[in-house]
Amino acid sequence: MDLRHNEIEGNSEPTQSLGQTSHLALDIGGSLIKVVYFSISRDNCIDREQESSANDTLGFSNGNCKHPILQGRLHFAKFETSKINDCLEFISSKKLHLGGFQHHENPGKNKNFIKATGGGAYKFTELFKENLGIDLDKEDEMDCLVAGANFLLKAVHHEAYTYIDGQKEFVQIDQNDLYPYLLVNIGSGVSMIKVDGDGKFERVSGTNVGGGTFWGLGRLLTKCKSFDELLELSHQGNNRVIDMLVGDIYGGMDYSKIGLLSTTIASSFGKAVSDNKELEDYKPEDVARSLLRMISNNIGQISYLNALRFGLKRIFFGGFFIRGQPYTMDTISVAVHFWSKGEAKAMFLQHEGFLGALGAYVSYAKHSIDDLVCNQSMQLPVSASYTADPNYNPLNGDFNDNESIQCSVYAA
Amino acid sequence: MDLRHNEIEGNSEPTQSLGQTSHLALDIGGSLIKVVYFSISRDNCIDREQESSANDTLGFSNGNCKHPILQGRLHFAKFETSKINDCLEFISSKKLHLGGFQHHENPGKNKNFIKATGGGAYKFTELFKENLGIDLDKEDEMDCLVAGANFLLKAVHHEAYTYIDGQKEFVQIDQNDLYPYLLVNIGSGVSMIKVDGDGKFERVSGTNVGGGTFWGLGRLLTKCKSFDELLELSHQGNNRVIDMLVGDIYGGMDYSKIGLLSTTIASSFGKAVSDNKELEDYKPEDVARSLLRMISNNIGQISYLNALRFGLKRIFFGGFFIRGQPYTMDTISVAVHFWSKGEAKAMFLQHEGFLGALGAYVSYAKHSIDDLVCNQSMQLPVSASYTADPNYNPLNGDFNDNESIQCSVYAA
């Protein structure tokens, strides 16, 4: 374990020593807790050379070093932050917290460390200590978002895609031509980060109109009990019932002189001004649809304006707001395309919701991202060079969840 | 009347000939109809020289030309577009429609023209014809907004002001250093216009999150019956009840690394996500406050980002959303100041809601704006050089409304 130990010693947290490797990392946001954990499917030691043929097909060269290897999957789970006890129970029942780091300064206490990011890593420190006996080792939220995005964009095949006219198209990222890009993470609020390289970034903007706004306003307006229910509802709705369109103002005509079609939304929820209706008189699905459109469009516009400032052509959208929803992605894509006159491109990520948690996970070793090899389970069985605890017990259970990433983890 | 006739002949509407001068102009928007009309308080002819001393104190030089003059006021009125009949009645009762232009091609029909802008000028053409027997002579909405803003900024003393830390401070506009500026008109929707001179402008952006969104969403959420009621309600509210602050996520701490205070709003309405509350459990005033803050902040941010694109230091906010509300102006000012790091300045206009209607009014003559002299009634009794119909009967009634502008109108 010397190599890894030294790497950790060399970073900004020299007081910690690694007794064992964790398989769990958390991103505790304002609305959701995102969990990433590793499960072992084959724990036999193999030689990296044995894998070279498989990796060669991906263009990765692992070299000839010999290490014990754990093959398995990275799994993803989420919980509502307001139901944090469900998360604690989940971790406890799967014993995910037992693979953490030990305090260097208090080896006798045998306290475990779990990497955690997001504001909740601060807010819920005591709760985790009391319930699971673990310390949350806090990683900066922006650091983690960027590390997670870079990891996914570099290591995971078929991660990024565009969504245009209902067509999802995977984008093969040229690792030599990845930077700079704008990362827009849509959580409860929205952060916009200009990324120039590994660990090189600046949070250039953000907006308080984000996923929490959609869900919060949506709950109040529709009485939906969950984010998923609200999104599902929005599929069936028609935003034109409540939104004031250019045509509503111009008597059905375009305002063509400035390029506004009659179908362009002039004012979100603007029809509610003059309709003599109460909230109950509108269908909840129409309300949900207008709200989704309003917020997606707004985020798309502010993202584009920030990309423009720095001449960024690619905008990657992450965070738990999008959820692969066609209407959301379409609205964002159209907004970016419209405002940038086709100059900038909106791209989405398969594991969009877990950037922060993945960033916290890869922060255990602070390996160079370039060394990681990982591929989505449904695509190709591949390996990730990553340090893991060979003494860790493989988890029982079925891990065929769609979002999981098949990985091989190398114990250094 | 030759001069004026020629001027009109020289513009893009050569088929019209002016028989008499109108004293009424309309801006019919998605939510509100804005009316500007002129009333005569003294209809004696005076020499412009007689006024030179008053004007000299303002730095205006009117020269020595002799013209009949009408002294009076420009008045402002508004109606909800959904209650357009109230507007028709108002015009009819005051006989404001009787001073319009006559059709050149149909002099026998004696049809009057009224200058009108906004989408409703198209939508309600027939309604005005049927009810008042007048044709709406349509002026482009953006043309009118810019003409109205330029008119106010150049001709009206104490028109523009900043609002910082609760302090309203009038800004003396140097007419030689007015351009370029960003004009942000917040009506039902929002238009953002880069203004480079008289009639020289480009609509560079806009957003569908505007006054109609505030009012529409606000109605649905609070059951308020009017925009004014909703604004009034918002005064008493506390947005922190529903908004998710950085401190709510970070356990009361700042996220100081990226400069976010614990009191910064991370997610508008984000607390409604986790509070186990229905809409009825929140106070309407808190909801109204959060909504006002969300929309004001959002408009401020998008405005700044557009000002930044073009290196514009001054942003003038117009439209009927702001209404001189301290909280609205404070939020917009802070947003512009925060995002621009103090580089850009938000400014507000005393007659913010009537830019389009004023622009339609001044379009009758298409005089050079530089010739106009006009001052707010409460400040100084001044004159505006403007062509008016000397045969027009002065209106009866009391015109001490606060928003009126005292003017002198010259019949050419």
Image (cartoon, coloured by chain):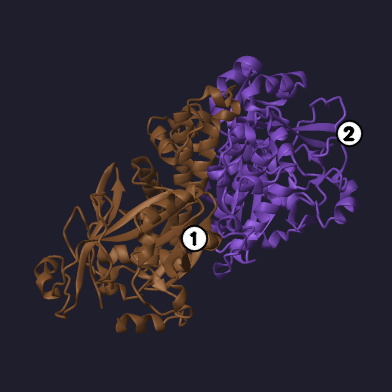
Chain colours: A purple, B brown
The location of residue A236, given as percent across then percent down, is: 75, 42
Disc on res. B139: none
The location of residue B390, given as percent across then percent down, is: 25, 71
The location of residue A368, given as percent across then percent down, is: 67, 48
Q: Amino acid at mark 2?
A: Asn
Dot 2, how many residues are within 10 Å of its Cα: few (below 14), some (14-19), or many (20+)? few
Nearer-the-camera pick, B162 or A102: B162
Nearer-the-camera pick, B237 or B224: B224
Could you tell me which residue is drawn at 88 percent across and 45 percent down?
Answer: A381
The residue lying furthest to the front in this view is: B108
Which corner quadrant holds the N terminus of chain B? bottom left
Q: Is residue B336 visible?
A: no
Helix, strand or loop at label 1? It is: helix
Q: Is residue A57 visible?
A: yes
**Alpha carbon separation for disc pair 2 and 1:** 85 Å
Write down the residue under mark 1: B128
Chain identifier of the residue bearing label 2 in the image: A
Chain identifier of the residue bearing label 1 in the image: B
Relative to B23, B219 lies left or right: right
Residue B154: which quarter of the image? Answer: bottom left
Write down the residue under mark 2: A44
Q: Amino acid at mark 1?
A: Phe
Relative to B220, A38 lies left or right: right
Which corner quadrant holds the C terminus of chain B? bottom left
